[in-house]
Image (cartoon, rainbow, N blue to C red):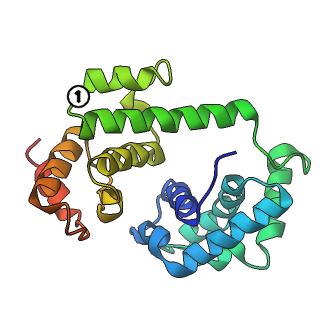
Amino acid sequence: MPEWTPKALAMRASELFAELNPIGKAWRFWRSDPKMLAAFRDVIAACAADKADPELYVQAQVDTMGRMAVAKGFKTLKPGCFRGENADARFARWLERKNGKRGSLTRHRDAEKLFELRLAAAQVFGEAYIAGGASMAEATEAAREVLHGWVPENLTPHERWTSLAAGCDCISVGLSDCVCAPDSWTWPAARMFVARVTAHDTRSQEPVAPDGWEELGSFL
């Protein structure tokens, strides 16, 4: 089971919520919202005590409270949806529906291994293509050394971000925390934009607005 941090779990929860196509982009700020991070910190601690999977736990909350929120037109979820007094009961009911019984709270080892390999391959690709200057073919081949048959077109939003973050941080540690990318970003745009930003001033560590990406993307 991967080591979850509040920020990483917030990113995963926001990815799951985004797949429900909510109105607006408020969910993007979960990974920097102190109250949200505190809720995810509690989730990780509670799951560690119960030997449960934090990712499954937040998936249960998004599948229940998230779907309800989107149906009502809400743009985001509140911290209590993830660690409120009814969250444990929702998780238990969700597991029962998924498994037909309470069952195991841990994921199958093969699925976890594949998940870790996909993230590792995405990181290798990002470092090679965005930071290393490799061609798409060369970076893809490097990723395939980690996971056979890997292709950049089949990545989830979380894997794409993992790849982008790896490339950014390979150039300048912590740079990924200063980048806000639009949903429609492309690999060539990412490499060109990161090169432009780091050439301008990698020491300022100022947040980079999505406008630059959109402007750059229009020339592709």
Rendered position, 178 above or below 56: below
Image quarter where the C terminus lies is top left
**Residue 84 sits in which quadrant?**
bottom right
Q: Nearer the viewer, residue 67 or 201?
A: 201
Q: Which of 35 and 177 is in front in this view?
A: 177
Q: Residue at x 86, y 52 (%)?
A: 96
Residue 22 visible within the image: yes
Q: Which residue is drawn at 32% across and 46% down?
A: 170
Residue 29 at x, y percent in the picture: 43, 71
- Residue named by callout 1: 134
Element assignment for label 1: loop
Rendered position, 131 above or below 56: above
Residue 16 shown left or right of residue 59 in the figure: left
Q: Which amino acid does label 1 sit on?
A: Ala
**Residue 116 sits in which quadrant?**
top right
Q: Residue at x 26, y 69 (%)?
A: 207
Q: Nearer the viewer, residue 64 or 131?
A: 131
